[in-house]
C-alpha cells in the first residue's frame, strides 16, 4: 500500500476502531486516565533524531503507474511474475520513503483518485519501459495528471514483462520540462549475483529519481529500506498480503522480515496497522488491548533504527492518545515528529486529534501560530477552514476556504470542501429569510463545485449530489442559461438516470414541466460526446446511467466500453463491470464510433 493509500485507509480504519476500543475491556486504568502497560508509554527513544529545517517552498509530487498498452490490468505490476512483482513493490516502497523524508515534497493522500487516474496512462504515447527517445517529450495525458492532482511533478513507474526478464522504467514529468530524469533497468533475480544486488540497484534508481526535486532543504538521512534482497522479498510479501486483506499472513511475513533484517524499521508502518486490524477482530477486551499494545511495541522498537521516521512517531502518538488515553505521551510523540519535519501537514492534522479537541478556537490559534507562517501551499488554510466549518461557523469557514482557493485553485479537496461549506452557509441564510445573501451564497457554492467537477469528474460521491442541491438553491430554482441548465441535468442524470426514487421528490417537482424536453435534449448530448469536450467524462457517466434507466443493455455495454477504452474508472463503472465485464471485454463496437484518441 502506498503512502497515500495507507494514510486514508488507516484514518478510516482507526476512526472505526476508536469506537471499538473505547467500548472494550480495559486491562489497567491509571490515575491520569490512561490505560495499558506503563512501560509502553515512557518517553520514546530519541538517539539519532535530527531537528529539521523549514523549507523555503514546497513541490507537490504524485506517483503514478502507467499500465501496459493492451493489458487488462490497470496496475502494470499485475502483469509481472510473482518474483518480479516483489521487486516492483520494493521500488515503490523505497520511493515512498524517499518522498516522506524530504520536507520540501508533498504528495496526494487521495488514494482512490490516484488509483483511478492510473488507467489514463495506458496510452501508447505515454512512455513505457522499452520505449526509446522520450526525453523531453510532453504529453496531454501527463499534463492532465498534473492538473488532476494540482501537482508540480509526476513520478511515473512502468513495469513490463518480457520472456528474458522484466524491464522497469521510472521518470519525472513536469509542465516545463516534459519527461526527464529517466532510469531504465532489467529486474534481474533477487539475491543474484550478490545477496543485495537488486536492493542496491533499486536504491540507485530511486535516489536518481528524487535527486534535485524542489527547493533543496536539509533533512534527516534516508535509511536503507532493507539490507538484503531476502529482506526486500519479505517486506514486499508483507505489504502485498496486507493490502490484499490477508492480515494474518502479513503478520507472519513481518516476523520473518525482522529475523532476516532486524534493522528494517520502516516495516513498522505496516506492523502497527496489522496489529490494529487484528485488534479490531477481537471480541475479548483483553485480547483487543493486547494487539493494540503490540502496535505500540512495534513502533517503539522501530524508532531505535529509524529515529527520524515521522510517520512512526506520529502514529504512535495517535494510537497512544486515541486508544489508551495517554494524551501526554501522544502530544510529546507527535511534537517529536514535528521537530523532525515542522511542516509535515499529515502530522499537523494528527496533532489536532489530541490537542484541545473540545476547543476548536484554540486549535485554530495553534495553527495560526505554528503552521500558517511556515506553510504556503494553501493546506493550512484548508485545515483551518475545515475546523471552523465543523463547528458550525459556515461564514467563517467560507472565508478561510476562499484564502485556500486563492493559493491553490486547482486543489480538488479545497474546491469540494469550499462548496460544501458554502452550501450550508446558503441553506442557513435561506432559513433566516436572507434571500439575497442566500442566492449569492448558493452561486458561490455552485462555482466551487463546478471547479471541483472540472478537476476530477470521476469523483461522484458528495460532489454530484451537492452540486445539484446548490445549483437549484435546494430544489427551488433553475438556471436560465442553457449551458448551465444542460450541465445541471447531466449531473443529475449521472446520479439517477433522471429516474424518480424516494429521494428525488423535490427534484421531480422542480423540473416536472421541462423534464420531457430535457430528456430528449440530453439523449442527443450524450449520444456521441466529443473526447475533446471538457465534460466528456460527465457525458459518458450520464450516458451509462441513462442507458441503464432505459433498460438498454446494448447501450450499457457500449457506454462501459467507451469508458474503459478512454481509461476512466469511476465507481459506477466498477459496479457495472462486475456484471457486464465479460461482455464488455469481448465487445466489438460499431466501426463509426471510435474510443478516446486524444
Image (cartoon, rainbow, N blue to C red):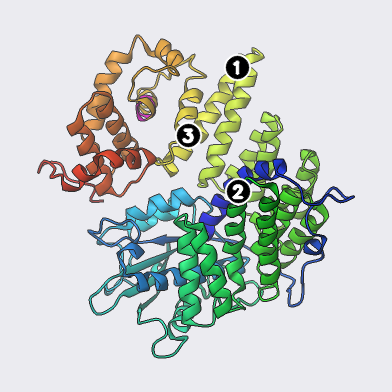
- Residue numbers of the magenta segment: 489-494
Q: Which mark's residue is nearer the viewer, 1 or 2? A: 2
Residues at marks 1 and 3, CA–CA distance in whole angstroms = 24 Å
Check residue 436 in the rendering and tell me which mark sits there, or answer none: 1
For disc 2, the marked residue is: 280
- Give residue 578's quadrant in the image: top left
Q: Of marks 1 and 3, which one's residue comes earlier in the chain?
A: 1
Q: Which residue is mark 3?
A: 463
Q: Mark on residue 98?
A: none
Of discs 2 and 3, which sits in the foreground? 2
Front residue (pair 110, 536): 110
- 598 relative to 488 in the view: left or right: left
* In contact (CB < 8 Å): disc 1 and disc 2: no
Q: Residue at point 46% right, 14% down?
A: 506
Residue drawn 62% across the image and 54% down it: 276
Q: Earlier in the sequence, mark 2 or mark 3?
A: 2
Residue 185 position, x and y percent, is 36, 79
Residue found at the far right of this picture? 31
As drawn, is 470 to the left or to the right of 376? left
Residue, far bottom: 193
Few, some or many residues within 10 Å of mark 1 (<14, 14–19, 20+): few
Amino acid at each position: 500500500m502506498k503512502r497515500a493509500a495507507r494514510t486514508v485507509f488507516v484514518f478510516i480504519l482507526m476512526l472505526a476502531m476508536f469506537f471499538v476500543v473505547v467500548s472494550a475491556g480495559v486491562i489497567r486504568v491509571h490515575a491520569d486516565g490512561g490505560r495499558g502497560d506503563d512501560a509502553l508509554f515512557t518517553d520514546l527513544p530519541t538517539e539519532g533524531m535530527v531537528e529539521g529545517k523549514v523549507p523555503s517552498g514546497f513541490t507537490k509530487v504524485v506517483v503514478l503507474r502507467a499500465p501496459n498498452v493492451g493489458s487488462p490490468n490497470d496496475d502494470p505490476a499485475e502483469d509481472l511474475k510473482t518474483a518480479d512483482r516483489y521487486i516492483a513493490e520494493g521500488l515503490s516502497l523505497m520511493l515512498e520513503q524517499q518522498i516522506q523524508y524530504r520536507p520540501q515534497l508533498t504528495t496526494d493522500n487521495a488514494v482512490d483518485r490516484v488509483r483511478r487516474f492510473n488507467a489514463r496512462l495506458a496510452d501508447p504515447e505515454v512512455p513505457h519501459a522499452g520505449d526509446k527517445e522520450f526525453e523531453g517529450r510532453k504529453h496531454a495525458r501527463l499534463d492532465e495528471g498534473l492538473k488532476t492532482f494540482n501537482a508540480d511533478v509526476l513520478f511515473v513507474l512502468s513495469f513490463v514483462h518480457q520472456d528474458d526478464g522484466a524491464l522497469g522504467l521510472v521518470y519525472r514529468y513536469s509542465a516545463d520540462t516534459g519527461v526527464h530524469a529517466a532510469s531504465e533497468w532489467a529486474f534481474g533475480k533477487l539475491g543474484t549475483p550478490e545477496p543485495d544486488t537488486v536492493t542496491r540497484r533499486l536504491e540507485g534508481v530511486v535516489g536518481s529519481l528524487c535527486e534535485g526535486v524542489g527547493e533543496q532543504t536539509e533533512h534527516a538521512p534516508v535509511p536503507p529500506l532493507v539490507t538484503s534482497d531476502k529482506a526486500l522479498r519479505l517486506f514486499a510479501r508483507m505489504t502485498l498480503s496486507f493490502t490484499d486483506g490477508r492480515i494474518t499472513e502479513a503478520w507472519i511475513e513481518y516476523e520473518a522480515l525482522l529475523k532476516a533484517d532486524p534493522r528494517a524499521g520502516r516495516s513498522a508502518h505496516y506492523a502497527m496497522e496489522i496489529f490494529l486490524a487484528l485488534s479490531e477482530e477481537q471480541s475479548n477486551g483483553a485480547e483487543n488491548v493486547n494487539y493494540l499494545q503490540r502496535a505500540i511495541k512495534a513502533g517503539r522498537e522501530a524508532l531505535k533504527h529509524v529515529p527520524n521516521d515521522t510517520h512512526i512517531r506520529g502514529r504512535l502518538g495517535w494510537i497512544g492518545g486515541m486508544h489508551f488515553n495517554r494524551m501526554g505521551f501522544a502530544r510529546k510523540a507527535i511534537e517529536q515528529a514535528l521537530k523532525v519535519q515542522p511542516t509535515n501537514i499529515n502530522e499537523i492534522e494528527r496533532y489536532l486529534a489530541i490537542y484541545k479537541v473540545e476547543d476548536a478556537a484554540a486549535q485554530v490559534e495553534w495553527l495560526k501560530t505554528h503552521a500558517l507562517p511556515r506553510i504556503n501551499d494553501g493546506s493550512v488554510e484548508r485545515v483551518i477552514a475545515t475546523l471552523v466549518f465543523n463547528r458550525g461557523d459556515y461564514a467563517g469557514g467560507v472565508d478561510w476556504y476562499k484564502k485556500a482557493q486563492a493559493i491553490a485553485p486547482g486543489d480538488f479537496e479545497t474546491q469540494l470542501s469550499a462548496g460544501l461549506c458554502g452550501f450550508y452557509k446558503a441553506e442557513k441564510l435561506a432559513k433566516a429569510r436572507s434571500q439575497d445573501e442566500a442566492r449569492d451564497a448558493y452561486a458561490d457554492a455552485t462555482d466551487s463545485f463546478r471547479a471541483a467537477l472540472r478537476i476530477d469528474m470521476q469523483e461522484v460521491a458528495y460532489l454530484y449530489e451537492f452540486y445539484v442541491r446548490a445549483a437549484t438553491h435546494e430544489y427551488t430554482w433553475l438556471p436560465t442559461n442553457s449551458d448551465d441548465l444542460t450541465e445541471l441535468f447531466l449531473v443529475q442524470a449521472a446520479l439517477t438516470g433522471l429516474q424518480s426514487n424516494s429521494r428525488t421528490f423535490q427534484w421531480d417537482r422542480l423540473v416536472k414541466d421541462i423534464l420531457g424536453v430535457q430528456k430528449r435534449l440530453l439523449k442527443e448530448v450524450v449520444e456521441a460526446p466529443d473526447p475533446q469536450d471538457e465534460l466528456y467524462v460527465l457525458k459518458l457517466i450520464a450516458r451509462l446511467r441513462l442507458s441503464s434507466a432505459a433498460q438498454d443493455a446494448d447501450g450499457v455495454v457500449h457506454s462501459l466500453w467507451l469508458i474503459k477504452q478512454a481509461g476512466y474508472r469511476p465507481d459506477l463503472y466498477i459496479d457495472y463491470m462486475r456484471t457486464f465485464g465479460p461482455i464488455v471485454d469481448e465487445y466489438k463496437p460499431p466501426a463509426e464510433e471510435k474510443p478516446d484518441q486524444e
